[in-house]
Image: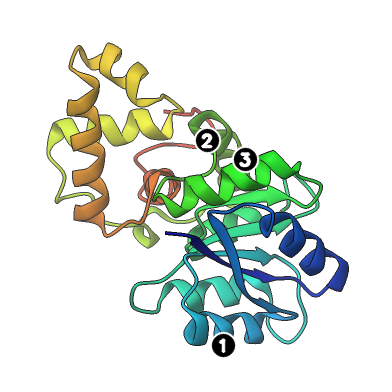
Amino acid sequence: MSVRVAVADDQEVVRAGFGALLGTQPDLEVVATAADGAAAVRVCRDHRPDVVLMDVRMPVMDGIEATRRVTAEPDPPRVLMLTTFDLDEHVYDALVAGASGFLLKDVTAERLFDAVRVVAAGEALLAPAVTRRLIGEFARLRPRPPSQGPALDALTPRETDVLRLVAAGLSNAEIADRLVVGEETVKTHVSRILRKLGLRDRVQAVVAAYESGLVLPRSGR
């Protein structure tokens, strides 16, 4: 079954370019495009894509607000933010809004294909260490009160330990080594953390760790 993709960007050349590239892959299908955030919300409701490539800066409604609205819908698509800068000041807000990761607009074709497939499969796009660097930087620059983050009371002590290590940039294998457990056990813990906190993926788990105060941006722990 093909992965259904929508492309939202106010630059026609970007929409056409990404659409043409994605169309070369037998397992990827572009089902809709949009030139602004409001249109992106509409096409997601009408066409039900699996993945949306969403520009951060668009007229009428920006990509962050569009992402917030799209991910609030029942059975929402995964959202990949498109940005020109690898440390775009809006990326943190986009991740908090529900995005599963981000792509630079000058991404290579193979990286684009891989990103769409990874996100469609339910994984976060960003490597944990990159996620930590990005979110930690903007959490440091614009700290939010811990009270605004999710409550972690539902987590067991071991799940809390796992979440802290996820936010510290460790992979499942590295967490398994640190806690002296099997990698499958770590995957189970991560799945339970996501379910208990109502999170979509690993990126959202890192955001939760920072916003709850479990991880402090300055110390990284």
x and y, in percent, of residue 4 in the image: 52, 66
x and y, in percent, of residue 6 in the image: 60, 70
| Sequence order check, earlier mark of 2 and 1 | 1
Q: Residues within 10 Å of mark 1 (few under 14, many from 20)?
A: some
- Which residue is found at the position 41% from the left and 76% from the top? 72
- Of circles 2 and 1, which is in front? 1
Element class at badge 2: helix
Q: Find disc 1 in the rendering and name its residue.
A: 42
Cα separation, mark 2 vs mark 1, equals 32 Å
Residue 81 appears in the picture as rendered: yes
Q: Is residue 21 left or right of residue 11?
A: left
| Sequence order check, earlier mark of 3 and 2 | 2
Q: Find disc 3 in the rendering and name its residue.
A: 137
- Which residue is found at the position 44% from the left and 71% from the top? 71
- Of circles 3 and 2, which is in front? 2
x and y, in percent, of residue 90 in the image: 67, 59
Element class at badge 3: helix
Cα separation, mark 3 vs mark 2, equals 8 Å
Q: Is residue 14 left or right of residue 82?
A: right
Under mark 2, the amino acid is Arg
